[in-house]
Image: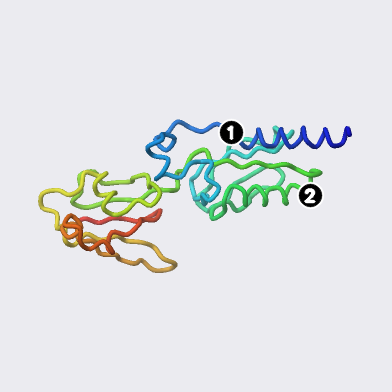
Amino acid sequence: MRTVSAIVLLLGVVVRMGIGQPVPPTAANSPSAAATTPTVNDESYIIGREDALSVIVWKEPDLSGGVPVRPDGKISLPLVNDIQAAGLTPMQLASHITEALKKFLEAPLVTVTVTAMNSRHIYLTGQIGRSGSMPLSKDMTVMEALASAGCCLEFANTKKIYVLRNEGDKTVRYPFNYKEALKGRGNAQNIALKPGDTIVVP
């Protein structure tokens, strides 16, 4: 009976640790943005370079804390040193860290939370109202990004806008005709953007 009670208590602690991680106040936490922006608790979120993570190892404060994802996609942790983070979900990374810690700890319990989604950005350049980097919302399209950036300047060639995207070892160019999109045509060109895309307004 004591063993069952201990297991129940342990599970309760783990659940509280997973749910109770602090969420930074951002627009993504508002009800209006919840449908379009992935949150830090989104289990399907793929960790990217420059994201900020919280790694909690139960009863091991020296092994716990906040860590940034480096440009090479890895994080550094005590005992396990460098471990790949980019390309994994928080749950997958927690599993990898758990396996690595088993060499040093008995039955480690690890929770990983994304505290800042710094990797999800796109870029706008050219004859645009506000050029530069822009946070990428979930399922954001070319039209939505242009609208958020103040759209196009007076002498912009809105028929020749294009998106540059790195795919493997090559850069692919996707055309976008803004004037046709305003008329409700050319929807196939109004693609969903991906992190790292660059919209060029000539």
Judging from the image, the colouring scheme is rainbow
x, y percent for residue 191: 32, 59
Judged from the image, the secondary structure of the residue bearing numbered disc 1 is loop
Figure quadrant of the C terminus? bottom left
x, y percent for residue 61: 70, 32
Crowd class of label 2 (few under 14; some 14 to 19; many from 20; radius 10 Å): few
x, y percent for residue 183: 16, 57
- Residue at left offset 14%, top offset 48%: 153
Q: Is residue 75 left or right of residue 106?
A: left
Which of disc 1 and disc 2 is earlier in sequence? 1
Judged from the image, the secondary structure of the residue bearing numbered disc 2 is loop
Q: State the residue lying farthest toward the left.
A: 155
Q: Which of 68 and 158 is in front in this view?
A: 158
Which amino acid, mark 2? Lys
Q: State the residue lying farthest toward the front.
A: 1
Q: Distance between the residues labelled 2 and 1?
A: 26 Å
Which amino acid, mark 1? Gln
Query: Which residue position is annotated with label 1?
Result: 21
- Residue at left offset 25%, top offset 49%: 146
Figure quadrant of the N terminus? top right
- Residue at left offset 17%, top offset 60%: 180
Query: Which residue position is annotated with label 2?
Result: 103
x, y percent for residue 114: 54, 41
- Residue at left offset 79%, top offset 43%: 105
